[in-house]
Every structure is written in C-alpha cells, then in structure tokens.
Amino acid sequence: MTLQWEHAVIGVLVFLLAMALGKWLFKKDTQQEIRLKGYASLATVLSKVGFKRLPRLLVDLAVKDVSGAFHELKELQELALDEPRMRAELFGVLHTAILESAKDPSELLKIRSLLNSVVTQASANAQALVDATSAPTLPAEASPSVTLPGHTVNIAQSPPTVVVTKLPST
C-alpha cells in the first residue's frame, strides 16, 4: 500500500480546508453578534444620558426585531417633524446630562462656561429684541434666577455670568 502517505496528506488538506471554511463562515456570525452587542451597550449608555426613543430602536436592532425597529424609526421621524416635541426631548437629554455632569466637581467649570455662553447669547438676543421694539431694559440690579432640581442658577446682568449653587436636599 503505497497510497497511505498520500491519503494522510489529502486528509490533512481536507481538514485544513474544512477549518478555513468553518472559520470564514462563522466569522460573519461573530462580527454580526459583536455588532448587535454593540447596539445593546450603546442603547444602555444613551438611556443613562437621557435618550428614550433611540435606545429602543437600538434594542430592537440588537434582538433583530425588524418590525419594532421600523416602528421606532417611524416614531423618530414623527418626533423630528414636530419641532416643539423635538426641542422638549433634546432639552430633557441636556438637562439629564448637565445634572449628571454636575456630580463631578471638575465638570462644574465646563457647565459654568456652557451656561455663560448660553446666557451671553440669550442676553444679546434679548437686547436685539428690546432694541427692535424700543422697550425699556431691565435694571442693572435685577438678577433673574432659574431653579432646576437640586440647583439654583443665578444669572447676573452685567457681565452675564452664571453661579450654580447646590440647594439643600429635602
């Protein structure tokens, strides 16, 4: 029997070909599973930040619920076309993000800078509106304030600055 070593070589080649084919076939599934797990983890992160609809879409994609994903896309489209609802949704996300960031003392300076730029822009817009309507301006000592859950934001008029103070918990 002179074909024994040839049979062994053919067997090894068939085995290697089968391994390569299996690896190639299952590589596609592995990449897809990694992508689906990524959708689920992104949905978790977005939920923590305050998003509501986008995480539901990502979860539907992660569990391969195509009809649910299309339903969520339709809701997102309706939300995007309704500007007041879209602003309210984005304001909720921004509010949650600011409150979460305020827990870290190093982030307070970034929040103060952001609020200062918003106040500066709002003051400029208000002044432009006042100039356009020739209405009287606010007195310099006026200091409007906004109360957020757990925080009071005092806005000084000149120069526009924001002071964030933590209210005592009840």
Image (tube, rainbow, N blue to C red):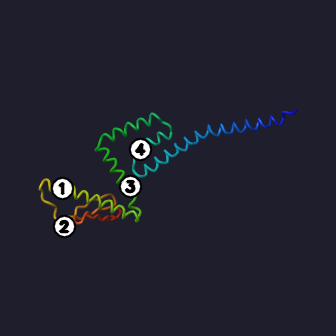
Of badges 1 and 2, nearer the viewer stands 1
| Coordinates of residue 159 in the picture (x, y in percent) | 24, 66
Identify which amino acid the numbered label 2 is placed on: Glu
Percent across and percent down for residue 106 are: 41, 65
- Residue drawn at x 45%, y 33% is 67
Mark toward the start of the polypeptide (1 vs 4): 4
Question: At x 41% / y 63%, what residue is drawn?
Answer: 104
Kind of residue at badge 3: Ala
SS for dot 3: helix
Q: How far from the left and from the top, in percent, is residue 77?
A: 35, 38
Callout 3 touching callout 1 (CB < 8 Å):
no
Quick check: 13 left or right of 5? left
The residue located at (28%, 44%) in the rendering is 84
**Label 4 or label 2, whichever comes before in sequence order:** 4
Q: Which residue is mark 3?
A: 97
**Label disc, if present, on residue 128 of the rendered structure:** 1
Q: Amino acid at mark 1?
A: Ala
Q: Are marks 4 and 2 in contact (CB under 8 Å)?
A: no
Most foreground residue, 7 or 118: 7
Left or right of 98 on screen, residue 58: right
- Residue 80, image x and y in percent? 33, 41
Among the two numbered marks 3 and 1 on one chain, the one whose residue lies closer to the N terminus: 3
* Up-down relation of residue 165 to residue 49 (above or below): below
Q: What residue is pinned by disc 4?
A: 54
Q: Answer with mark 4 or mark 3, whichever residue precedes in sequence.
A: 4
Q: Disc 4 versus disc 3: distance between alpha carbons? A: 16 Å
Residue holding disc 2: 141
